[in-house]
Image (cartoon, rainbow, N blue to C red):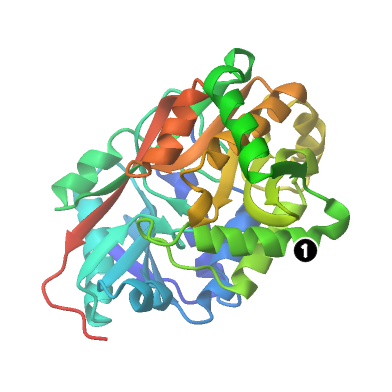
Amino acid sequence: MEINLHSVRTSGELARFIDVPWRVDPDPNWVPPLRLAVKAALDERHPSWRRNRRQLWIAYRDGKPVGRIAAILNREHLEHWRDGAGFFGFFDTINDQAVANALLSKAEEWLREQGCQSAVGPVSPSPHYEMGILTAGFDTPPFLMLTHNRPDYPALLAAAGYEKAVDLFAYLIPTNSVNLGGKVARVGETLGRRWGVTLRAGDMRQFAREAAIIHRLYNTSMQGQWGFTPIGESEFAAFAADLKRIIDPDLVVFAERDGEPVGFVLALPNLNEVFIRIRDGRLLPFGLLKLLWHRRHIRTVRVILAGLLPEWQRRGAGSLLYSEITRRIAAKGYAFAEMSWVLEENLLMNRAAQLLGGRVHKSYRVYKKALDHAFTA
Protein backbone atom coordinates (compact mmCIF):
# COMPACT_ATOMS: atom_id res chain seq x y z
CA MET A 1 0.00 0.00 0.00
CA GLU A 2 1.26 3.44 -0.95
CA ILE A 3 2.76 5.74 1.67
CA ASN A 4 2.09 9.45 1.19
CA LEU A 5 4.07 12.15 2.99
CA HIS A 6 2.39 15.51 3.53
CA SER A 7 4.35 18.55 4.65
CA VAL A 8 2.88 20.55 7.53
CA ARG A 9 1.95 24.09 6.57
CA THR A 10 -1.17 25.15 8.48
CA SER A 11 -2.21 25.24 12.13
CA GLY A 12 -4.65 22.40 11.47
CA GLU A 13 -1.89 20.26 9.98
CA LEU A 14 0.32 21.09 12.97
CA ALA A 15 -2.42 19.82 15.29
CA ARG A 16 -2.52 16.57 13.30
CA PHE A 17 1.29 16.34 13.48
CA ILE A 18 1.15 16.69 17.27
CA ASP A 19 -1.55 13.99 17.41
CA VAL A 20 0.44 11.33 15.53
CA PRO A 21 2.11 9.61 18.55
CA TRP A 22 -1.33 8.64 19.85
CA ARG A 23 -2.07 6.93 16.48
CA VAL A 24 1.02 4.75 15.99
CA ASP A 25 0.69 2.08 18.69
CA PRO A 26 2.82 3.69 21.44
CA ASP A 27 4.57 1.55 24.05
CA PRO A 28 2.45 0.97 27.21
CA ASN A 29 5.00 2.88 29.31
CA TRP A 30 4.95 5.91 27.01
CA VAL A 31 4.01 9.09 28.88
CA PRO A 32 1.80 11.32 26.71
CA PRO A 33 3.22 14.84 26.43
CA LEU A 34 1.05 17.84 27.05
CA ARG A 35 -0.13 18.92 23.61
CA LEU A 36 0.23 22.58 24.53
CA ALA A 37 3.91 22.01 25.38
CA VAL A 38 4.63 20.31 22.05
CA LYS A 39 2.80 23.08 20.19
CA ALA A 40 4.88 25.70 22.00
CA ALA A 41 8.14 23.90 21.14
CA LEU A 42 7.19 23.77 17.45
CA ASP A 43 5.75 27.29 17.25
CA GLU A 44 7.93 29.31 14.89
CA ARG A 45 7.74 32.19 17.37
CA HIS A 46 9.68 30.11 19.92
CA PRO A 47 13.19 31.55 20.48
CA SER A 48 14.83 28.36 19.19
CA TRP A 49 13.44 29.08 15.68
CA ARG A 50 14.66 32.66 15.41
CA ARG A 51 17.78 31.47 13.62
CA ASN A 52 17.08 27.79 13.06
CA ARG A 53 14.66 26.17 10.60
CA ARG A 54 12.50 23.07 10.57
CA GLN A 55 10.20 21.22 8.19
CA LEU A 56 7.57 18.74 9.37
CA TRP A 57 5.93 15.80 7.60
CA ILE A 58 3.15 13.34 8.36
CA ALA A 59 3.10 9.92 6.69
CA TYR A 60 -0.31 8.56 5.64
CA ARG A 61 -1.41 5.16 4.42
CA ASP A 62 -5.02 4.66 3.30
CA GLY A 63 -5.78 8.11 4.68
CA LYS A 64 -4.59 7.22 8.19
CA PRO A 65 -1.51 8.73 9.86
CA VAL A 66 1.25 6.13 10.30
CA GLY A 67 4.21 8.33 11.25
CA ARG A 68 5.78 11.77 11.46
CA ILE A 69 9.21 13.41 11.36
CA ALA A 70 10.89 16.82 11.56
CA ALA A 71 14.04 17.87 9.71
CA ILE A 72 15.94 20.58 11.59
CA LEU A 73 18.66 22.92 10.40
CA ASN A 74 20.36 24.18 13.57
CA ARG A 75 22.58 27.07 12.51
CA GLU A 76 23.90 27.51 16.05
CA HIS A 77 25.19 23.94 16.03
CA LEU A 78 26.71 24.31 12.55
CA GLU A 79 28.51 27.53 13.45
CA HIS A 80 29.80 26.10 16.73
CA TRP A 81 30.91 22.64 15.54
CA ARG A 82 31.30 23.16 11.78
CA ASP A 83 30.59 19.45 11.27
CA GLY A 84 27.83 19.75 8.67
CA ALA A 85 25.33 17.91 10.87
CA GLY A 86 21.61 18.36 10.37
CA PHE A 87 19.07 16.96 12.82
CA PHE A 88 15.90 14.94 12.59
CA GLY A 89 13.41 14.75 15.44
CA PHE A 90 9.80 14.24 16.52
CA PHE A 91 10.17 10.81 14.94
CA ASP A 92 7.22 8.46 15.47
CA THR A 93 6.17 5.53 13.30
CA ILE A 94 4.27 2.29 13.23
CA ASN A 95 6.44 -0.84 13.23
CA ASP A 96 6.92 -0.88 9.48
CA GLN A 97 10.30 -0.47 7.82
CA ALA A 98 8.80 1.04 4.67
CA VAL A 99 7.16 3.82 6.68
CA ALA A 100 10.32 4.49 8.71
CA ASN A 101 12.41 4.56 5.54
CA ALA A 102 10.03 6.96 3.83
CA LEU A 103 10.08 9.37 6.76
CA LEU A 104 13.84 9.28 7.25
CA SER A 105 14.50 9.59 3.52
CA LYS A 106 12.32 12.69 3.31
CA ALA A 107 14.16 14.33 6.21
CA GLU A 108 17.52 13.37 4.69
CA GLU A 109 16.49 14.85 1.34
CA TRP A 110 15.57 18.16 2.95
CA LEU A 111 18.79 18.27 5.00
CA ARG A 112 20.81 17.47 1.90
CA GLU A 113 19.15 20.40 0.12
CA GLN A 114 20.29 22.65 2.99
CA GLY A 115 23.88 21.49 2.40
CA CYS A 116 24.18 19.17 5.39
CA GLN A 117 26.71 16.36 5.43
CA SER A 118 24.98 14.07 7.93
CA ALA A 119 21.65 13.42 9.61
CA VAL A 120 21.75 13.10 13.43
CA GLY A 121 18.91 12.34 15.79
CA PRO A 122 16.38 12.11 17.06
CA VAL A 123 16.75 15.58 18.57
CA SER A 124 13.47 17.27 19.46
CA PRO A 125 13.93 20.16 18.78
CA SER A 126 17.58 20.63 19.93
CA PRO A 127 20.12 18.91 22.19
CA HIS A 128 18.89 21.09 25.05
CA TYR A 129 15.56 19.23 25.05
CA GLU A 130 14.55 15.63 24.26
CA MET A 131 17.22 13.55 22.60
CA GLY A 132 17.81 9.94 21.64
CA ILE A 133 16.01 6.64 21.14
CA LEU A 134 15.41 4.43 24.16
CA THR A 135 17.49 1.25 23.73
CA ALA A 136 17.21 -0.29 27.22
CA GLY A 137 14.79 0.14 30.12
CA PHE A 138 11.44 -0.35 28.39
CA ASP A 139 9.80 -1.84 31.50
CA THR A 140 9.18 1.47 33.29
CA PRO A 141 7.88 4.90 32.22
CA PRO A 142 10.40 7.66 31.51
CA PHE A 143 11.12 10.49 33.90
CA LEU A 144 10.20 14.11 33.21
CA MET A 145 11.32 15.53 29.85
CA LEU A 146 12.73 12.22 28.61
CA THR A 147 11.53 10.24 25.65
CA HIS A 148 10.15 6.70 25.38
CA ASN A 149 9.53 4.44 22.41
CA ARG A 150 8.70 0.86 21.48
CA PRO A 151 11.57 -1.68 21.46
CA ASP A 152 11.45 -1.96 17.65
CA TYR A 153 12.72 1.59 17.03
CA PRO A 154 16.48 0.82 17.24
CA ALA A 155 16.13 -1.90 14.59
CA LEU A 156 14.11 0.41 12.33
CA LEU A 157 16.85 3.03 12.44
CA ALA A 158 19.65 0.52 11.97
CA ALA A 159 17.92 -0.97 8.92
CA ALA A 160 17.63 2.55 7.47
CA GLY A 161 21.41 2.89 7.58
CA TYR A 162 21.84 4.71 10.89
CA GLU A 163 24.61 3.94 13.36
CA LYS A 164 25.49 5.00 16.88
CA ALA A 165 26.62 8.58 17.44
CA VAL A 166 26.58 8.54 21.25
CA ASP A 167 24.86 6.79 24.15
CA LEU A 168 23.21 8.55 27.09
CA PHE A 169 22.53 6.97 30.48
CA ALA A 170 19.86 7.46 33.15
CA TYR A 171 20.95 6.44 36.65
CA LEU A 172 18.35 5.42 39.23
CA ILE A 173 19.36 6.21 42.81
CA PRO A 174 17.27 4.83 45.72
CA THR A 175 17.50 7.58 48.31
CA ASN A 176 17.18 5.23 51.31
CA SER A 177 20.39 3.43 50.37
CA VAL A 178 22.59 6.40 49.51
CA ASN A 179 25.86 6.40 51.42
CA LEU A 180 26.53 9.97 52.39
CA GLY A 181 29.57 9.05 54.46
CA GLY A 182 32.90 7.70 53.35
CA LYS A 183 34.62 9.28 50.40
CA VAL A 184 31.88 11.82 49.64
CA ALA A 185 31.95 13.16 53.20
CA ARG A 186 35.76 13.43 53.13
CA VAL A 187 35.58 15.30 49.85
CA GLY A 188 33.14 17.77 51.38
CA GLU A 189 35.35 18.35 54.41
CA THR A 190 38.39 18.89 52.19
CA LEU A 191 36.57 21.37 49.96
CA GLY A 192 35.32 23.33 52.92
CA ARG A 193 38.66 23.42 54.70
CA ARG A 194 41.05 23.86 51.78
CA TRP A 195 39.01 25.82 49.28
CA GLY A 196 36.34 27.53 51.36
CA VAL A 197 33.48 26.04 49.34
CA THR A 198 29.99 26.43 50.83
CA LEU A 199 26.55 25.29 49.69
CA ARG A 200 23.22 27.14 49.63
CA ALA A 201 19.69 26.52 48.39
CA GLY A 202 18.03 28.50 45.63
CA ASP A 203 16.13 31.68 46.48
CA MET A 204 12.84 32.02 44.59
CA ARG A 205 12.59 35.66 45.67
CA GLN A 206 15.64 36.25 43.48
CA PHE A 207 14.58 33.97 40.64
CA ALA A 208 15.99 36.14 37.83
CA ARG A 209 19.38 36.29 39.56
CA GLU A 210 19.42 32.54 40.22
CA ALA A 211 18.41 31.77 36.63
CA ALA A 212 21.21 33.99 35.31
CA ILE A 213 23.74 32.13 37.48
CA ILE A 214 22.51 28.75 36.22
CA HIS A 215 22.60 29.97 32.62
CA ARG A 216 26.21 31.13 32.92
CA LEU A 217 27.44 28.05 34.77
CA TYR A 218 25.60 25.69 32.43
CA ASN A 219 27.05 27.24 29.28
CA THR A 220 30.55 27.37 30.74
CA SER A 221 30.60 23.86 32.19
CA MET A 222 29.18 22.09 29.14
CA GLN A 223 31.71 23.45 26.65
CA GLY A 224 33.20 20.61 24.63
CA GLN A 225 30.55 18.04 25.57
CA TRP A 226 29.15 16.06 22.66
CA GLY A 227 26.60 18.07 20.69
CA PHE A 228 26.52 21.01 23.10
CA THR A 229 26.09 24.55 21.86
CA PRO A 230 25.69 27.51 24.24
CA ILE A 231 22.05 28.31 24.82
CA GLY A 232 21.12 31.93 24.13
CA GLU A 233 19.51 34.32 26.59
CA SER A 234 16.03 34.37 25.04
CA GLU A 235 15.83 30.59 24.68
CA PHE A 236 17.08 30.04 28.22
CA ALA A 237 14.60 32.61 29.52
CA ALA A 238 11.76 30.61 27.93
CA PHE A 239 13.14 27.41 29.46
CA ALA A 240 13.49 29.06 32.89
CA ALA A 241 9.92 30.38 32.73
CA ASP A 242 8.69 26.81 32.27
CA LEU A 243 10.83 25.57 35.15
CA LYS A 244 9.57 28.29 37.48
CA ARG A 245 6.11 26.70 37.47
CA ILE A 246 7.36 23.42 38.95
CA ILE A 247 10.67 24.19 40.65
CA ASP A 248 11.23 23.45 44.34
CA PRO A 249 13.86 25.87 45.71
CA ASP A 250 15.00 23.24 48.21
CA LEU A 251 16.09 21.11 45.25
CA VAL A 252 18.36 23.77 43.75
CA VAL A 253 21.83 23.81 45.29
CA PHE A 254 24.63 26.25 44.54
CA ALA A 255 28.30 25.79 45.44
CA GLU A 256 30.09 29.05 46.20
CA ARG A 257 33.56 30.22 47.12
CA ASP A 258 33.82 33.62 48.78
CA GLY A 259 30.27 34.32 47.66
CA GLU A 260 30.98 33.58 44.00
CA PRO A 261 29.08 30.68 42.38
CA VAL A 262 31.28 27.86 41.10
CA GLY A 263 28.65 25.19 40.51
CA PHE A 264 25.01 24.17 40.82
CA VAL A 265 22.69 21.18 40.62
CA LEU A 266 18.94 21.23 39.97
CA ALA A 267 16.35 18.50 40.53
CA LEU A 268 12.67 18.59 39.57
CA PRO A 269 9.69 16.57 40.80
CA ASN A 270 8.97 13.84 38.27
CA LEU A 271 5.69 15.14 36.88
CA ASN A 272 5.56 12.18 34.50
CA GLU A 273 3.99 10.32 37.41
CA VAL A 274 1.02 12.64 36.80
CA PHE A 275 1.21 13.06 33.03
CA ILE A 276 0.92 9.31 32.47
CA ARG A 277 -2.59 9.60 33.95
CA ILE A 278 -3.54 12.34 31.45
CA ARG A 279 -3.75 9.93 28.53
CA ASP A 280 -5.00 12.39 25.92
CA GLY A 281 -2.36 15.02 26.69
CA ARG A 282 -4.99 17.70 27.29
CA LEU A 283 -5.19 19.79 30.47
CA LEU A 284 -8.85 20.62 29.85
CA PRO A 285 -11.39 19.72 30.96
CA PHE A 286 -10.08 17.17 33.51
CA GLY A 287 -6.31 17.01 33.04
CA LEU A 288 -5.65 20.05 35.20
CA LEU A 289 -7.60 18.52 38.09
CA LYS A 290 -5.55 15.33 37.80
CA LEU A 291 -2.35 17.37 37.76
CA LEU A 292 -3.25 19.33 40.87
CA TRP A 293 -4.43 16.23 42.74
CA HIS A 294 -1.70 13.74 41.89
CA ARG A 295 1.34 16.01 42.05
CA ARG A 296 1.04 15.90 45.85
CA HIS A 297 1.86 12.18 45.74
CA ILE A 298 4.93 12.25 43.48
CA ARG A 299 7.59 9.86 44.81
CA THR A 300 10.47 10.49 42.42
CA VAL A 301 12.58 13.37 41.13
CA ARG A 302 14.90 13.91 38.19
CA VAL A 303 18.31 15.55 38.61
CA ILE A 304 18.05 17.42 35.34
CA LEU A 305 20.78 20.07 35.26
CA ALA A 306 24.22 20.45 36.77
CA GLY A 307 27.21 22.62 36.07
CA LEU A 308 30.67 23.31 37.46
CA LEU A 309 33.29 25.78 36.36
CA PRO A 310 36.02 23.79 34.57
CA GLU A 311 38.65 24.45 37.25
CA TRP A 312 36.40 22.85 39.89
CA GLN A 313 35.38 19.76 37.96
CA ARG A 314 38.28 17.63 39.24
CA ARG A 315 38.40 18.97 42.79
CA GLY A 316 35.41 16.95 44.00
CA ALA A 317 32.86 19.76 43.97
CA GLY A 318 30.56 17.64 41.82
CA SER A 319 30.45 14.85 44.41
CA LEU A 320 29.70 17.43 47.08
CA LEU A 321 26.79 18.89 45.07
CA TYR A 322 25.35 15.50 44.13
CA SER A 323 25.50 14.16 47.67
CA GLU A 324 23.82 17.31 49.00
CA ILE A 325 21.01 17.25 46.44
CA THR A 326 20.42 13.55 47.14
CA ARG A 327 20.30 14.23 50.89
CA ARG A 328 17.71 16.96 50.29
CA ILE A 329 15.69 14.68 48.01
CA ALA A 330 15.59 11.99 50.70
CA ALA A 331 14.71 14.54 53.40
CA LYS A 332 11.63 15.61 51.42
CA GLY A 333 10.37 12.03 51.31
CA TYR A 334 11.14 11.09 47.71
CA ALA A 335 11.97 7.41 47.25
CA PHE A 336 14.09 7.60 44.09
CA ALA A 337 16.14 10.11 42.15
CA GLU A 338 17.10 9.74 38.52
CA MET A 339 20.29 11.42 37.34
CA SER A 340 19.84 11.88 33.62
CA TRP A 341 20.89 12.01 31.11
CA VAL A 342 24.64 11.36 31.43
CA LEU A 343 26.86 11.16 28.36
CA GLU A 344 28.77 7.88 28.21
CA GLU A 345 32.01 9.82 27.78
CA ASN A 346 31.43 12.02 30.87
CA LEU A 347 33.52 9.93 33.25
CA LEU A 348 33.25 12.32 36.19
CA MET A 349 29.45 12.40 36.19
CA ASN A 350 29.16 8.65 35.63
CA ARG A 351 31.49 8.09 38.58
CA ALA A 352 29.54 10.50 40.79
CA ALA A 353 26.28 8.67 40.03
CA GLN A 354 27.89 5.33 40.86
CA LEU A 355 29.33 6.63 44.14
CA LEU A 356 25.81 7.61 45.18
CA GLY A 357 24.60 4.04 44.59
CA GLY A 358 23.09 4.71 41.16
CA ARG A 359 22.63 2.05 38.52
CA VAL A 360 21.93 2.56 34.84
CA HIS A 361 18.25 1.70 34.40
CA LYS A 362 17.71 3.32 30.98
CA SER A 363 19.94 3.90 27.98
CA TYR A 364 19.30 6.24 25.06
CA ARG A 365 21.10 6.39 21.73
CA VAL A 366 21.54 9.24 19.28
CA TYR A 367 22.02 7.98 15.72
CA LYS A 368 23.85 9.37 12.71
CA LYS A 369 23.99 8.74 8.98
CA ALA A 370 26.31 10.23 6.42
CA LEU A 371 24.69 12.05 3.50
CA ASP A 372 26.20 12.10 0.06
CA HIS A 373 27.86 15.50 -0.23
CA ALA A 374 29.87 17.85 1.93
CA PHE A 375 28.58 20.79 3.90
CA THR A 376 29.73 24.25 2.85
CA ALA A 377 29.51 27.10 5.33
Indicate the position of residue 308 as horizontal and vertical percent values. 55, 51
Indicate the position of residue 290 as horizontal and vertical percent values. 76, 35
For residue 187, above or below residue 206: above
In this image, 154 relative to 188: left or right? left
Quarter of image, res 235: bottom right
From the image, tell me which residue sits under label 1.
209
Q: Is residue 70 visible?
A: yes
Q: Residue at x 59, y 39 (%)?
A: 303
Indicate the position of residue 365 as horizontal and vertical percent values. 31, 44
Quarter of image, res 369: bottom left
For residue 101, above or below residue 24: below
Q: Nearer the viewer, residue 249 or 361?
A: 249
Residue farthest to the left, as pictured? 372
Residue farthest to the right, as pictured? 205
Quarter of image, res 4: bottom left
Q: Nearer the viewer, residue 116 or 157?
A: 116
In this image, 340 relative to 207: left or right? left
Indicate the position of residue 254 as horizontal and vertical percent values. 69, 47
